[in-house]
Image (cartoon, grey):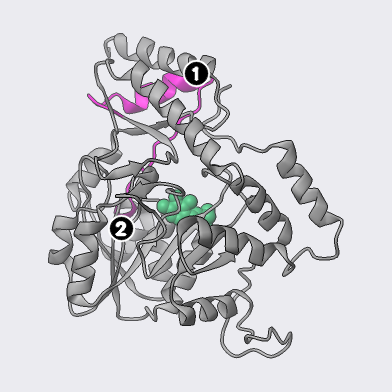
Amino acid sequence: MIPLAKPYITDEDKKAVLEVLNTPYLSLGPKLPEFERVMAEYVGRRYAVAVNSGTSALHLAMKALGIGQGDEVITTPFSFIASANCILYEGAKPVFVDIEEDTLNIDPDKIEDAITERTKAILPVDIFGHPCDWDRILPIAEKYGLKVIEDACEALGSEYKGRKCGSFGDISVLAFYPNKQITTGEGGVLLTDDEDIYKLCKSLRNQGRGETDEWLTFERLGYNYRLDEMSCALGISQMKKIENIIQKRNEIALQYQKLLQDIEGIQLLSPMRYVTKMSWFVYVIRVQNNRRDELMHKLNEKGIQTKTYFYPPIHLQPFYKQLFGYKEGDFPVAEGVAKETLAIPFFTQMTSTEIHQVAEAIKETLLVKDQ
Ligand SMILES: *Cc1c(COP(=O)(O)O)cnc(C)c1O
């Protein structure tokens, strides 16, 4: 079986986690601020707040920016559900804007049309690791006085015109679920340059405790979104090899590109010129001629795992349709793309043999004409 994704865990990583277990500090110990320092430094932000998932980080971003009932937040329908759900958590309304055909990111040209008096923020997602075209998004936010939340959960290490993803939002968010570039098991981090946001999020993650962390005094309604010490230690250890991880993943993507580019009926995603460094989260191909599901089933029969990232798009998820009355045809680019995209096996330690096996299986299936 060739899995879709697999965490890359070394003996060093295991040792780092075990060391924590030999101390009395399993939560709120020294690894938490150390991990936060590592992440803030890597991305080039002043502050980092580590939490127990990317979704938690997105939720705190909404709280910290004061987004709530009656507010609208502009975002993309072609993403993981969490990037829109976080808006609903606080009673605000996600307003979707269709995507660009070539990057699969929110289309900057369509953002202004979606802005109303209620719009408070824009939440773009660097999808599959491909940076948004920030120079076309940030000026719009500036012009209308909107906050920017960057969901960079899939883009750790990617760079836009020499600047790292995770550095573009008033608040940016990264995530470390086991299928991401690095993992902490569950985990996420919120990044900002604003000291007030930083302090507020630290409090919100820890049950609303004050700055002194006085254990039984609570200054506001907070949550338990803490990231434990084992996870932080794993994150610190994983970050030591981040450049190596990104490079290996780039080599795999390059091999895939060479092997798949000439297959008829397949379209590959290639980074735009403004992407000065690509950190691939998943490797997604577009399968044309309505053959995506057939390919998925054939690969599955051969023990090759795939997933239809992201089908259906968020606005056509059952409860979004129910809540907001969205229907087929509302965001045609996202819908068209979502019918074609298929993520194929992609993980840091993937061997050349495995890559060839996947490519061969795809070729075999698509060379046979659909009956
Ligand atoms: C992974 C991911 C998240 C966060 O997911 P968690 O499982 O909560 O860590 C958020 N947005 C996007 C686009 C993601 O891919």
In the rendering, at what x and y percent does residue 54 appear? Answer: 51, 59
Instruction: Name the residue carrying label 1.
Output: 301
Q: Amino acid at mark 2?
A: Lys
Decide: is 193 above or below 165.
Answer: below
Number of numbered markers? 2
Quarter residue 294 falls in: top left
Is residue 307 in view from this perspective?
yes
- Whether 212 is among the magenta residues is no
Decide: is 67 above or below 235.
Answer: below
Q: Which mark is residue 76?
A: none
Circle 2 SS class: helix
Q: Amino acid at mark 1?
A: Glu
Per the rendered image, the range of residues in magenta is 286-315
Badge 1 density bin: few <14, some 14–19, many ≥20, Cα 10 Å: few
Q: Is residue 204 left or right of residue 88?
A: right
Q: Earlier in the sequence, mark 1 or mark 2?
A: 1
Badge 2 density bin: few <14, some 14–19, many ≥20, Cα 10 Å: some
Question: What residue do we see at 27% from left, 49% from top?
Answer: 105
Instruction: Kindly check if marks 1 and 2 are in contact, taking CB atoms under 8 A apart as contact.
Output: no
Q: Which mark is residue 321?
A: 2
Task: Say if disc 2 is inside 8 Å of ligand 1.
Answer: no
Question: What residue do we see at 24% from left, 40% from top?
Answer: 273
